[in-house]
Amino acid sequence: MPLRHDQVRQARAHLRRCDATMATIIDEVGPFTLRPERDRFWMLVKSIISQQISVGAARSIRNRLLQLIAPQKVTPEALLALSAEELRSAGISPQKARYLHDLAAKSAEGIVAIRSIGRFSDEKVIAELTQVKGVGRWTAQMFLIFALGRLDVFPEDDLGVRTAIRDRYGLDDLPDRQTALQVAAPWRPYATVASWYCWRALDVARDQKTFATGYPL
């Protein structure tokens, strides 16, 4: 479900007070439009597909996978019914096919509790999801933000966030993890909202549309 309007209002007010640079970004980008993904399993599938490839390539592969499974939805059972060869026909590499099958199997068996995971703490969500092959901390953080709508997640290793910090905070190089965490410290407890504005700040720099409901997975 979308983040509540009062939460977003409080977050934007906090970020404006604590960080003049972020206040400028908020003015440039405009309203906060994140809408968490309702289908949690599909969110994880998209994240795995998107690893280390371009946004356009990931989108093309997703569409071919949807066509392969249609008229069914992408569920653990539907993925397990597909062979590695069939996944390959959709453009999914053998390694990612193994990751997707592992995700599907652990979801179907209840090893990864997709249905009840929304009741877990942030760190417990990360621990739960990283049981899956190919799912690391970054993927779990994307899930926290874009599936669960958690307010205070800072993906310190995300290239887009680090690039925005470099460009907007006057750094010569991409910040290392410690530097990124220092910049983000005043954003707490609304690091998710600030991170989303970092992604959208890159859109502003590229003169691209900034109304976006999620991360371009």
Image (spheres, grey):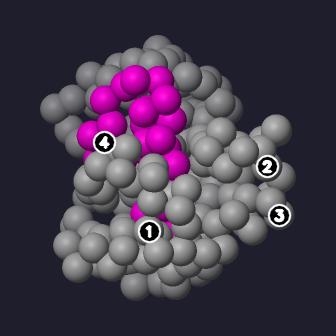
Q: Tag 1 or tag 4, which sits nearer the N-term?
A: 1
Report, in whole angstroms, how far the alpha carbon at label 1 lies from the one at label 2.
22 Å
Is 214 in front, or is 15? 15
Report, in whole angstroms, how far the alpha carbon at label 1 lies from the one at label 3.
23 Å
Q: Tag 2 or tag 4, which sits nearer the N-term?
A: 2
Labelled pair 3, 4 in contact (Cβ < 8 Å): no
Is 105 in front, or is 15? 15
- Mark toward the viewer: 1 or 3: 1
Report, in whole angstroms, how far the alpha carbon at label 3 lies from the one at label 4.
28 Å
Residue bounds of the magenta highlight: 191-217
- Amino acid beneath label 3: Gln
Look at 55% across and 41% down and name the residue there.
48
- Amino acid beneath label 2: Pro
Question: Considering the numbered disc 4 on the image, is that residue within a helix, a strand or a loop?
Answer: loop
Residue 37 visible at all: no
Is residue 7 depicted above or below 74 in this figure?
below
Q: Looking at the rendering, in which quadrant would you find the C terminus? A: top left
Report, in whole angstroms, how far the alpha carbon at label 4 lies from the one at label 1.
21 Å
Q: Which residue is mark 4?
A: 212
Q: Which residue is mark 3?
A: 178
Look at 62% across and 45% down and name the residue there.
168
Q: Which residue is mark 1?
A: 16
Q: Which residue is mark 2?
A: 175
